[in-house]
Image: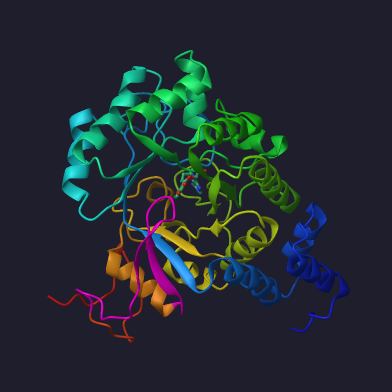
Amino acid sequence: MSTRTDPRFDEIASKVRGGTPLTLADGVFLYRYPDLLAVGSLANEVRERLNGNKTYFNVNLHVNPTNVCVADCKFCSFARLRPGDPQAYTMTLPQIRAKLKERGDGITEVHVVGGLHDEVPWSYYLDTIRELKAERPDVHIKAYTAAEMHFFAEHYKMPMTQVLTELIDAGLGSMPGGGAEIFAERARRKLCTGKADAEQWLDVHRQAHRLGLRTNCTMLYGTVETLEERVDHMLRLRALQEETGGFQTFIPLAFHPEGNSLGKLPAPTGVDNLRTYAVSRLMLHNFGHIKAYWIMIGLATAQVSQSFGADDVDGTVQEEKIYHMAGAGTPQALSRSELVRLIREAGRHAVERDTLYGVRWEDDGAPLPGIRIDASVPYSNNNGRISLSVAH
Ligand code: V47
């Protein structure tokens, strides 16, 4: 395919190289441009200008304290509406602490998100963080999406600054990027009701940034949204980043159709995933990082995405519920060595970061402990287990 001489593509490429922000029309053009490799290669230029050959990862643990949730999100396979539902659960504080004790070896971050549970006291959410910090004072707590923060303010009748300040005092270190879905009202109305709308979601992040918290942001794609709505979503994030500079990384989240009421929709294809990484890298010129969450797009696409604009693969995760209840075929955890191998084989230089992108370790190419390097053994999912020879 040779469409690289298209003058409109060349015009966009010149804007990218000259540092001119792209417009909505530019983004939609890139989504529709047939030469995927040309779009990917342009995104890779930006990725390498900002992050060189580095691919970041961290060693983290996900904790989902409850799946009881009052919101109605059509794409969600994790939430249960009422506490009495046989599949509903709410972890006790000792259970939360025990999870970190049991599975927290070597981790630097706990990622905490859950449902909007209206029958627990505000202290439950604060104490969750206090318990984790009491168990491991050294660990960074990245907790509660803007949708949860908005719920806390409404349900417990507190101004947002109080919600955030009390959580910071309890030990909150930063906020994850979930709950953004798609900002466009037309699509959002069909996808989710009973939780923060676009402006409310953005305002929680604005206030968090003002209080000095760094946060992440996401976009759920592949449901009912148009390409224009995807690019509009990116532009709204870019505008807030221009205002506050508080976002660390953008994470595109590919829709998983199992176990939810949008189950008839197909999952986004590999090409759509790669194009979305590339377009977001090109639209979000003021973001330092684009994260390819391997849990969600699979190990193979996470590797290839490192040449399509992404420079981060998230972390070891340890136990993931939100995507696995929606049919994710990836394993529930990767070891540190497995992540490094994944990055090495993508031709990138693995860098272990902390939550705030401080460098903790850089790959020196040494053989990886516990793993026999055998190029004939593919990274493939085998009912949640990875096919790897582990040397004992
Ligand atoms: O808010 C839920 C999305 C998010 C489905 O900040 C779904 O570092 C696709 O935000 N198909 C939670 N998406 C995950 C998230 C996240 C993940 C990794 C790192 C970070 C970070 C944040 O997942 C939800 C929602 O937008 N989601 N169900 C589904 N069936």
Q: Does the magenta stretch include residue 43?
A: no
x, y percentage for residue 247? 56, 46
| Residue 75 seen anywhere in this rendered image of the structure | yes
Q: Would you say residue 89 is visible in this rendering? A: no
Question: What kind of secondary structure does the magenta stretch mostly adopt?
Answer: loop
- Up-down: is 136 above or below 210? below
Residue drawn at point x = 45 percent, y = 77 percent? 346
Q: Which residue is drawn at 46% across and 68% down?
A: 55
Residue that protrudes farthest toward the right in the picture: 7
Residue 308 percent coordinates (x, y):
59, 70
Q: Quadrant of the C terminus?
A: bottom left
Does 223 sit above or below residue 270?
A: above
Q: What stretch is highlighted in magenta?
A: 346-371
Q: Nearer the viewer, residue 107 or 146?
A: 107
Q: Nearer the viewer, residue 236 or 221?
A: 236
Residue 280 is situated, as x and y percent measured from the top left of the image, at 64, 58
Q: Where does residue 85 sit, x and y in percent of width and height?
A: 33, 27
